[in-house]
């Protein structure tokens, strides 16, 4: 995981570590189960990667993130919105979104504390706080990022909250019963199973059953799936289709713009159609920024962003079976310095999205032979490397989109190449290397 340049991950309690691992492996389809088996059977196989994965996001592409999967501190103030059937309004425009809310005690994790605060405000301002424990007693028993902009919280080991840029969904303490467990719909792409007695159950499509004993379990619904296609079995003897789940409380608490009906917007619509349905509660919050298309062998890409929260791009990639969308949070440190990486994607070609300062006038990407040994502070400067491919990048709204056709040259370990990005300013006409992978 070194090349991801991830920050050090906080230590996780053993039970949370195991639950994160269980969810990650299920999403990766690493071990579809033909028959129920204990969660601990997964532990030895992938324990080394759990902490790093838990500190970033669960996606098919690489982002450069910290502990803030949803960038909640950079959301606009809460506003009154109408989210449709089953959706409650948020707080008054210009008001304090947490006014009158007894907030949970600090956990030491700012992203978790802010997510919990939004969930607490949702139930209080919806008038349904009486259905939950006192919000000052809430604590997160698991907080995990989903993609770049959303996160799942398990609260008090008894109910759940799904946090997205424009809304939050809070399960009740009960749901539609199915034997000894209960099912709640959190969004079009996600269910929650409530299991107050901690009994073993299995849920999913045949051959892809998720097995759990957790009291709160998020269940992803993938593209083309519906709950009535899924089966659920539990230790109490239930074995049948997943019943129609009760809808979670959904509160639209941020009024964010959605992408317009333009050729670029429709291209993004088609791009998101191929993504897992659990990845975004509302993918229309991604607004097109512009095209990167420099011709030649460099793949074109459409850049999009959600304000200052996140940035990403859609590109056609045969390795991923069509269009791929790479995304990551935008962090305050992306606003300082000459340039910093936001998203790196390697498939049929290589692509990197950089946040750049206003001083940058030009950005270029090159594929160069990989160094045989990493340089040390005492070693001589490495020899100048002749690029095997070069391409220009496109600067769009303080983002630089770079793509290059590097895959054909990576046919063996001896022939590996590195991707190098160079930024140019009026004061640095010779260019400054800002990224190497």
Image (cartoon, rainbow, N blue to C red):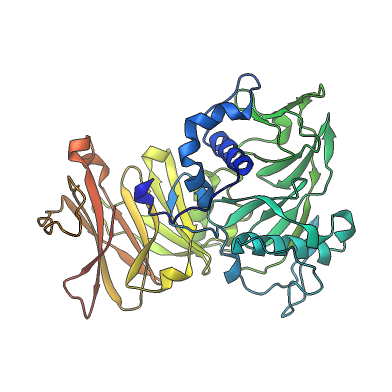
- Which residue occupies 18% across, 75% down? 429
- Which residue occupies 53% across, 58% down? 67
Q: Quadrant of residue 87?
A: bottom right
- Which residue occupies 43% across, 69% down? 333
Q: Residue 228 location in percent, x, y? A: 74, 32
Q: Residue 335 location in percent, x, y? A: 42, 73
Closer to the camera in the image, 350 or 32: 32
**In this image, 322 relative to 370: left or right?**
right
- Which residue occupies 26% across, 48% down? 405
Q: Quadrant of the N terminus?
A: top left
Q: Residue 155 location in percent, x, y? A: 73, 51
| Residue farthest along the top direction in this orientation | 35
Q: Quadrant of residue 312?
A: bottom left
Q: Quadrant of residue 284?
A: bottom right
Closer to the camera in the image, 124 or 356: 124
Q: Is residue 379 visible?
A: yes
Q: How many marks?
A: 0
Q: Residue 88 location in percent, x, y? A: 80, 62
Closer to the camera in the image, 80 or 262: 80
Reply above or below: 50 against 387. above
| Residue farthest along the right direction in this orientation | 130
Q: Is residue 263 visible?
A: no
């Amino acid at each position: 995981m070194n090349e991801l340049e991830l920050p050090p991950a906080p230590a996780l309690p053993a039970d949370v570590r195991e639950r994160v691992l269980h969810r990650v492996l299920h999403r990766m389809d690493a071990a579809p189960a033909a028959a129920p088996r204990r969660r601990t059977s997964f532990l030895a196989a992938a324990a080394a990667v759990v902490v790093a994965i838990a500190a970033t996001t669960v996606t098919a592409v690489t982002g450069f993130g910290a502990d803030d999967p949803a960038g909640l501190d950079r959301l606009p103030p809460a506003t009154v919105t109408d989210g449709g059937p089953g959706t409650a309004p948020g707080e008054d425009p210009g008001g304090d979104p947490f006014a009158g809310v007894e907030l949970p005690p600090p956990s030491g994790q700012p992203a978790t504390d802010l997510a919990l605060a939004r969930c607490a405000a949702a139930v209080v301002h919806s008038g349904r706080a009486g259905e939950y424990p006192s919000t000052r007693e809430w604590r997160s028993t698991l907080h995990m990022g989903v993609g770049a902009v959303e996160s799942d919280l398990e609260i008090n080991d008894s109910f759940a909250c799904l946090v997205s840029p424009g809304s939050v969904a809070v399960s009740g303490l009960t749901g539609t019963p199915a034997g000894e467990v209960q099912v709640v719909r959190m969004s079009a792409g996600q269910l929650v199973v409530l299991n107050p007695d901690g009994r073993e159950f299995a849920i999913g499509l045949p051959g892809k059953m998720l097995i759990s004993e957790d009291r709160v379990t998020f269940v992803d619904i993938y593209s083309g799936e519906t709950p009535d296609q899924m089966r659920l079995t539990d230790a109490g003897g239930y074995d049948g289709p997943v019943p129609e789940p009760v809808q979670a409380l959904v509160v639209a608490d941020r009024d964010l713009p959605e992408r317009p009906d333009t050729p670029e917007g429709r291209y993004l619509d088609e791009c998101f159609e191929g993504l897992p349905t659990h990845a975004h509660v509302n993918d229309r919050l991604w607004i097109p920024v512009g095209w990167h298309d420099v011709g030649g062998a460099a793949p074109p890409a459409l850049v999009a962003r959600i304000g200052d929260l996140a940035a990403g791009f859609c590109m056609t990639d045969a390795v991923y079976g069509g269009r791929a969308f790479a995304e990551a949070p935008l962090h305050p440190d992306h606003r300082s310095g000459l340039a910093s990486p936001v998203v790196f994607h390697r498939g049929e070609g290589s692509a990197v999205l950089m946040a750049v300062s206003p001083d940058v006038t030009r950005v270029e990407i090159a594929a160069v032979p990989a160094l045989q040994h990493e340089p040390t502070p005492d070693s001589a400067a490495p020899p100048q490397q002749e690029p095997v491919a070069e391409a220009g990048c496109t600067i769009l709204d303080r983002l630089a989109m770079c793509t290059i056709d590097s895959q054909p040259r990576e046919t063996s370990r001896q022939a590996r190449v590195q991707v190098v990005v160079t930024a140019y300013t009026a004061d640095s006409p010779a260019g400054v290397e800002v990224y190497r992978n």
